[in-house]
Image (tube, helix red, strand yellow):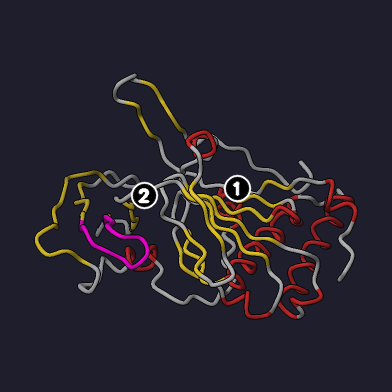
Amino acid sequence: MAEEPEKQKTEQTEITEKTEAAEKTEPAEKTEAADPSRIASEVCPEEYSAPGSYFETPSACPICRREIAMKWQKGNIPYFGDIMFITSECDKCGFHFADMMILSSKDPVMYEISLKEKDDLNARVVRSTSGTIIIPEMGITIEPGHISESYITNIEGLLQKVRGVVESAIRWSEGEPEKIQIAENLLKWIDQLVSDTEHAPQTTVIIKDPFGNSAIIDAHASSRILTPEEAAELKTGMIILNADKDELLHDISEHAGPIGN
């Protein structure tokens, strides 16, 4: 087994959704099922929509202030359950908006898989907007923010997403050779996982979701219910109010920075 670089053992890399969005990095991935964000942008195809659940609310275009309609369509997507598609478009300036809200919630859950053979790269990954992805050996944590995306892919597709974020971190770390070296070592690690999984350093992929809408689906994956204390420590990607106490339970505050910070 390849020796894990000492620097990677000591450096903790926290890469948030804000990093992904800022760099607009969208590497190719092997998607095995419907991408909810794509479905939303297509104004909810009939196969996912729920009859009789469409309505509109008036709004204003954030670009030109023209009055526009916000369109709401309830639907259902495999693995995610009940969802709400939200779309809007301005025929004056061309502004377009599409988003999706997951309406259902389950017990807080954690899924984990150890990548030991090539077939493990085909494990299905369901990541909701509230899912936190952790690759502990690499020191990588991807936490949800207010612009988080839901997607269904596989482990290899997820690694390609991580690769894109690490490449962004390299661009942010110009003039900092130590951080760049750490990032380049991570890229080599990812490449070895994809090309020669059996001989790559030990690697574990973990997904935690306080609403239970994320999963790793594979015979080699394990799962367990999170304790209330563990779930409370996770970011959700949204603002949740406690109506009884009139206080903020979770917010979207986060920090992002280059590798090594």
Distance CA(mark 1)–CA(mark 2): 24 Å
Q: Can residue 77 be found in the magenta stretch?
A: yes
Disc assigned to residue 106: 2
Q: Is residue 232 visible?
A: yes
What residue is at 17 percent from the left and 45 percent from the top?
A: 58
* Residue plotted at (51% across, 71% down): 124
Q: Quadrant of the C terminus?
A: top right
Describe the element under mark 2 as helix, strand or loop: loop
Residue found at x 83% / y 62%: 185
Across and down, in percent, residue 68 comes to: 21, 50
- Is residue 194 placed above or below 232 in the rendered structure? below
Compare residues 159 and 172 and report the one nearer the observer: 159
> In the rendered image, is residue 87 in sight?
no
Say which amino acid is labelled 2.
Lys
Instruction: Judge from the rendering whether residue 213 lies leftward or rightward of residue 145; answer left or right.
Output: left
Q: Secondary structure at mark 1?
A: loop
Badge 1 density bin: few <14, some 14–19, many ≥20, Cα 10 Å = many
Question: Percent from the top left, x then y, of residue 172?
Answer: 73, 51
Residue lying at the far top of the rendered structure: 245
x and y percentages locating residue 224 in the rendered image: 51, 52
Q: Is residue 55 left or right of residue 82?
A: left
Classify 10 Å Cα crowding around label 2: few (below 14), some (14-19), many (20 and above).
Answer: few
Q: Which residue has dot 1 on it?
A: 16
Disc 1 vs disc 2: Cβ atoms closer than 8 Å?
Answer: no
